[in-house]
Image (cartoon, grey):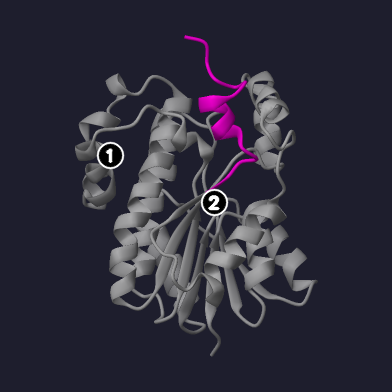
Amino acid sequence: MKDVMILTGAGQIGMAIARRMGYGKKIVIGDKSLKNAEAIAKTMNEAGFDAEAVEMDLSSRQSIKQLIEKAASYGEISMLVNAAGVSPSQASIETILKVDLYGTAVLLEEVGKVIKKGGVGVTISSQSGWRMPALSQEEDELLATTPTEELLKLPLLQAENIRDTLHAYQMAKRCNEKRVMAESVKWGERGARLNDIAPGIIVTPLALDEFNGPRGDFYKNMFAKCPAGRPGTADEVANVAELLMSDKGAFITGSTFLIDGGATSSYFYGPLKPEK
């Protein structure tokens, strides 16, 4: 029996983190596209890892539980890397909320029930969650602590209160960060840690979809005018994950790390500041 890493989302960021932290472990890769999961598993297995692909739908509690059950059949689950999700150009408001918001909350909850003592998790949110005006303390608490099956019924998440897919995505990512704070308390009762990484523009197939989508010029302008002057790489996200998931991050839990080349800073206090 080996320690097991669950990786959800067969993409560049998830794979970069799994390659950094998954050595010596069984890596169970869940993705809605089995083909994508198999491609990542093949790449990793050919590099000496022990990975297996599983079809998984993040919007389904049953599917998440089946993935966890499969992972647990190999040993104790000691790591979670959640890099699954859909982008504003890829999906409807309803799908974004069901996958990115509800699905992530369910995954953190279900893995939190079985995570090994000393285990760690990271979930990937987005700089987008930092762009919205601040929510009220009550709204933040509702996003953090509402029972998962009631989350999508919250008034602030109803269709009349969500402007478009980008707003839905921002709400989902804000919820992810608040959920990590609340769930980290429960994970702590098991001696485990949970954190969040909020990347800016990282060059991945998903990002390339955005570059070529209706907001492409907006994104290109964003990385051109951020202090770093470029988009990031998946390996730079993995650098942060390595800190959070290693013993060097032993005192870090319930936190979100923004890694966006300074785009959010520029949005509030620099050349990316919206005109009033």
Mark 2 falls on what kind of element? loop
**Kind of residue at badge 2:** Lys
Report x, y in % for residue 98.
Answer: 38, 41
On the question of residue 144 being in view, the answer is yes
Amino acid type at mark 1 = Leu
- Residue placed furthest toward the top: 276
Query: What's the residue at 43%, 21% (across, down)?
Result: 164
The image shows residue 276 at horizontal and vertical percentages of: 47, 9
Specify which label sits upstream in the sequence, 1 or 2: 2
Provide the residue span drawn in magenta: 258-276
**Disc 1: which residue:** 152
Which of the 4 image quarters holds residue 101?
Answer: top left
Query: How far across and how far down the image is residue 78, in percent?
Result: 48, 77
Q: Quadrant of residue 272?
A: top right
Give the residue at x 63% y 73%.
22
Q: Is residue 273 above or below residue 11?
A: above
* Residue situated furthest right in the rendering: 46
Q: Residue furthest front?
A: 269
The verdict on residue 274 being magenta is yes
Tell me where residue 219 appears, x and y as whole percent. Answer: 65, 26
Residue at which label 2 appears: 32
Tell me: residue 129, above or below residue 182.
above
